[in-house]
């Protein structure tokens, strides 16, 4: 046996909390409201289109940047929703999931010694990608309970080494959203700098109570310095297909594609054709998503009204934060493990989304589930 001295490039990283909690949930046959995936299928027309295109032989490598038909459909959707006309050939890249797009964008522009501002709590793939690029994540906290951005704190975090600022709206895990005022303030802050923006907009169509999703693509000034990342997995309930995309100006897209081509090169070919068909034939699907998920949010909230959990406001995305202070004073990691083992429901401890977790007792539940699943989970949670 050969023993090697190995220095980890990600010494702080282990198995993700989503995998850990899902495995524990499976072991104890718990209702899984932890990992953010639907337990229902996407549109039947999408599955039928995938089958059709598979039979038509679209099973080999796709073009590196994505098939033209899908990029053109994305361009049309971008103009219709956000009023920005983008070039399908030079500004849109189809990726193997939004996570790949985020990684490629970070590695396209972040060099050793650069700083990247992230807003805590944030999704757990951000910082490892930054560190692998040789950069340093600078964490700016979002204050509870509304988790709105304190732009003065963001301004104070900017240094001559700041290369990139990452935003996420609707926000995972809090459900908070950015307003037009937020984007205007960000534009003012970055004007006359070389700082770029990476906007994680995977929940762009899951936004509630009549709000409008404020995309960087709908803000002319920010769009010129931004990577905007979205996810067909979230929009069409097909997280396992791992298909996303990135929209960015030609110069940024060219650098993005240099990384993408050596990361995954291309993305699931037949599925791209299927998605192109559905984007063109049925835009109503994504236009109806706000009501579809708002009904689930409200159903879950009503089902938990008799529980001892205090529910925080949810403006978008498909996660409900719940304060368990009235139930236990233990830390959220311990509470979530006990929630699975003793009560049969899986959630995610919100501390997993922080560099330095504040003193709070919050668990994240995913409500992208059937009503039967939500009711089964709520019955167990109300019994605590």
Image: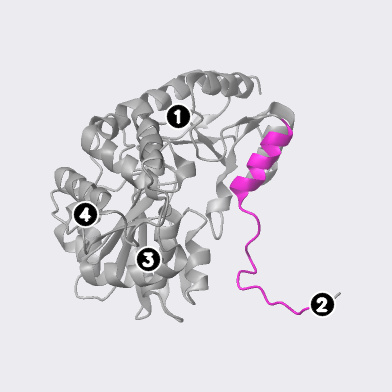
Give the Cα separation between the discs numbered 1 and 4: 29 Å
Q: Please state the extent of the stretch shown in magenta in the rendering.
A: 3-28
Asked which secondary structure carries label 3, the reply is: helix
| Residue at image mark 4 | 217
Please name whichever residue, 308 or 128, is drawn nearer the observer in this view of the structure: 128
> Is 327 on the left-hand or right-hand side of 68?
right
Give the Cα separation between the discs numbered 3 and 2: 36 Å
The stretch drawn in magenta includes residue 22: yes
Give the Cα separation between the discs numbered 1 and 2: 47 Å
Extreme residue toward the right, this view: 1
Please name whichever residue, 25 or 355, is drawn nearer the observer in this view of the structure: 25
Q: How crowded is mark 4: few (under 14 residues within 10 Å), some or many (20 or more)?
A: many
Mark 1 / mark 4, whichever is N-terminal: 1
Asked which secondary structure carries label 2, the reply is: loop
Mark 2 / mark 4, whichever is N-terminal: 2
Which quadrant is home to the C terminus? top right
Give the Cα separation between the discs numbered 2 and 4: 51 Å
Q: Residue 105 bears which disc, if any?
A: 3
Q: Quadrant of residue 160?
A: bottom left
Q: Where is residue 222 in the image (x, y as percent from the top left)?
A: 21, 62
Which quadrant is home to the N terminus? bottom right
Q: For the residues labelled 1 and 2, say whether their Cβ atoms are less than 8 Å apart.
A: no
> Can residue 210 be seen at all in this image of the molecule?
yes
Q: Which residue does the image show at 41% across and 35% down from the upper left? A: 51
Q: Which residue does the image show at 24% across and 49% down from the upper left? A: 69
Give the Cα separation between the discs numbered 4 and 3: 16 Å
Q: How crowded is mark 3: few (under 14 residues within 10 Å), some or many (20 or more)?
A: many
Q: Is residue 189 above or below residue 33?
A: below
The stretch drawn in magenta includes residue 5: yes
Q: Which residue does the image show at 68% across and 77% down from the upper left? A: 7
Q: Where is residue 209 in the image (x, y as percent from the top left)?
A: 28, 30
Mark 4 / mark 3, whichever is N-terminal: 3
């Amino acid at each position: 046996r050969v023993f090697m001295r190995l220095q980890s490039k990600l010494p702080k990283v282990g198995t993700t909390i989503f995998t850990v909690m899902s495995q524990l949930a499976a072991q104890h046959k718990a209702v899984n409201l932890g990992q953010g995936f639907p337990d229902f299928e996407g549109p039947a027309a999408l599955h039928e289109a995938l089958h059709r295109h598979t039979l038509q032989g679209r099973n080999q490598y796709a073009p590196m940047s994505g098939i033209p038909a899908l990029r053109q459909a994305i361009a049309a959707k971008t103009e219709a929703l956000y009023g920005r006309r983008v070039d399908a050939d030079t500004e849109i890249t189809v990726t193997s999931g939004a996570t790949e797009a985020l990684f490629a964008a970070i590695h396209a522009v972040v060099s050793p010694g650069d700083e990247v501002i992230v807003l805590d709590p944030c999704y757990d793939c951000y910082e490892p990608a930054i560190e692998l690029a040789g950069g340093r994540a600078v964490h700016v906290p979002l204050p509870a309970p509304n988790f709105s951005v304190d732009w003065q704190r963001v301004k104070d975090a900017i240094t001559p080494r700041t290369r990139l600022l990452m935003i996420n709206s609707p926000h995972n895990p809090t459900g908070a959203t950015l307003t037009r005022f937020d984007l205007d303030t960000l534009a003012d802050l970055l004007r006359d700098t070389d700082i770029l923006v990476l906007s994680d907009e995977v929940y762009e169509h899951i936004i509630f109570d009549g709000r409008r999703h404020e995309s960087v693509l709908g803000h002319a000034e920010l769009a010129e310095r931004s990577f905007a990342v979205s996810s067909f997995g979230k929009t069409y309930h097909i997280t396992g297909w791992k298909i996303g995309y990135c929209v960015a100006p030609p110069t940024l897209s060219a650098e993005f594609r240099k990384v993408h081509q050596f990361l995954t090169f291309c993305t699931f070919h037949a599925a791209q054709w299927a998605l192109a068909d559905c984007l063109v034939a049925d835009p109503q699907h994504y236009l109806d998503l706000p009501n579809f998920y708002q009904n689930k949010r409200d159903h879950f909230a009503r089902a938990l009204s008799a529980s001892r959990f205090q529910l925080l406001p949810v403006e978008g995305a498909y996660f409900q934060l719940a304060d368990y202070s009235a139930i236990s004073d233990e830390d959220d990691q311990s509470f979530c493990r006990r929630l699975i083992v003793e009560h049969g429901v899986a959630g995610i401890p919100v501390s997993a989304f922080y560099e330095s977790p504040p003193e709070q007792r919050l668990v994240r539940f995913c409500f992208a589930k059937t009503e039967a699943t939500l009711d089964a989970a709520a019955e167990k949670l109300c019994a605590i």
